[in-house]
Amino acid sequence: MRQEKNNIFLNLDWVLILLYFILVAFGWMNIYAASSTNTSGEVFDFSTKYGKQILWIFLSFPLIIFILFFNSKFYERFASVLYLISLTSLVGLFLFGKNINGATSWYNFGGVGLQPSEFAKAFTALAVAKLMSDRQYSLKLIKNQIKAFIIIFTPAFLITLQPDPGSALIYLSFFFVLNREGLTLSYIILGFLAILLFILTLYFGTKIILLACFILITLALLYGMYKERQFLRFNLLRFLTIYAIVGLFVYGVGFAYNSVFEQRHRDRFDVLLGRKIDTKNIGYNSYQSELTISSGGFWGKGYLQGDRTQGHFVPEQHTDYIFSTVGEEWGFWGSSLVIILFMGLLYRIIYLAETHTNKFGRIYGYGLASILFFHIIVNIGMVIGLLPTVGIPLPFFSYGGSGLWGFTLLLFIFIRLDAHKKYDW
């Protein structure tokens, strides 16, 4: 038993590890296709995007060993400390960060950039798991809900100020974790309704939506009064309260759209909602990405044979739009295979989380699955034109050392928690 406990490689889930390396390897192949200028490029040319990515992949190995080296209890005991360190790194950007493309999201170390928001997700997941693994903790209490919201949205707020709203959106994924641990589903339902109301307000305008909401709320309350036989005064007060909240939200959407959003943000929503056709400026990336994917057909054009990828029609294709390379060169079947691999990874994580003998490990596992799921859905939805461009990378695929290491950290902390769950807890 003691020998088993001291062997960090015992009971590692090799299915997760295999899926990780398959996704990373396939991701690199597509980064090579999207960033190489010719098919005879040197793989280890570190002046190229694909050369740098393979270097970061190799450097992931010592990171993995480092993560597995620590006892599982370390991550629970020091979750709060790691979370505070991540917050400090986010605050430090405002003093020492480097501004790239209008966002101060990076530290620059001798020409090497590091994005702390990619690591903050893992430490936030640890902090949430630490808070909610307390036996006395219950999400039925409002004060406990507020504690969880503060932990989740503090890093999101700091990331929004950089400004990097795309990365901040990822923290909404933690609502799936909270719901799994007892938070009422009404929060998620309200969230979806708010998103729907936001989109409808942008599409139809404030006046039409206010009138539609007035009619719907009135009908709903009249029906409720008929079913419950409540007094009219009580229902009138309820009506005024609900309509005031909805009205403020709708007006808030209009104000934010016209006064807070920058023109590039307004253009992206207008293109997405079909209010504006722009294939040359703000909508160029999405338009070219859709054309690139559709040109691949069912079987694809073949690896390194994608003329649109090789012609660099999609700007920055090796980063957020890497899935368009898969669509063109590997076709529908290759794109489906990538999605199946991701779904297999998510299923395996959730399965292991549910069988975990410790609440901390289970909650962290759900945090990991939720973050990955949100990244996958938003990124692919963005690339195929269903969602606006928000700058969210595809896990293990998109180019970048910070992204790769951040997702590696997220995954292998869970693998470490799961590996010795019979012995460490």
Image (spheres, rainbow, N blue to C red):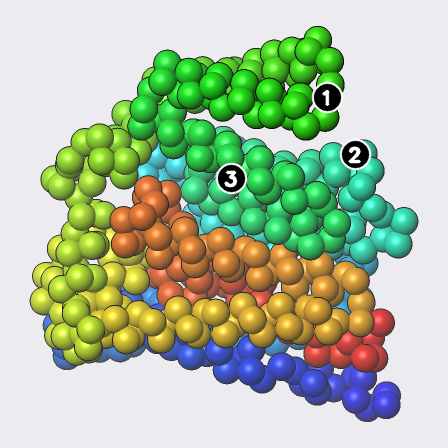
Quarter of the figure that contains the C terminus: bottom right
Who's the residue at 41% across and 51% down the image?
Answer: 378
Who's the residue at 20% across and 62% down the image?
Answer: 293
Between 224 and 23, the one lying in front of the other is 224
- Is residue 415 toward the left or the right of residue 393 in the image? right
- The answer to whether residue 88 shows anywhere in this view is no
Image position, residue 281 (x, y; %): 16, 37
The residue sitting at the right extreme is 136
Between the residue at mark 2 and the residue at mark 1, the CA separation in whole angstroms equals: 30 Å
- Is residue 133 toward the left or the right of residue 136 in the image? left
Residue 229's tag is 1
Quarter of the figure that contains the N terminus: bottom right
The answer to whether the residues at label 2 and label 1 have Cβ atoms under 8 Å apart is no
The residue that disc 2 covers is: 142
User: How many other residues sit within 10 Å of disc 1, few (<14), some (14-19) or many (≥20)?
Assistant: few
Q: Mark 2 against mark 1, which lies toward the viewer?
A: 1
Image position, residue 160 (x, y; %): 49, 34
The first of marks 3 and 1 along the sequence is: 3
The first of marks 2 and 3 along the sequence is: 2
Between the residue at mark 3 and the residue at mark 1, the CA separation in whole angstroms equals: 30 Å
Secondary structure beneath dot 2 equals: helix
Who's the residue at 52% across and 72% down the image?
Answer: 345
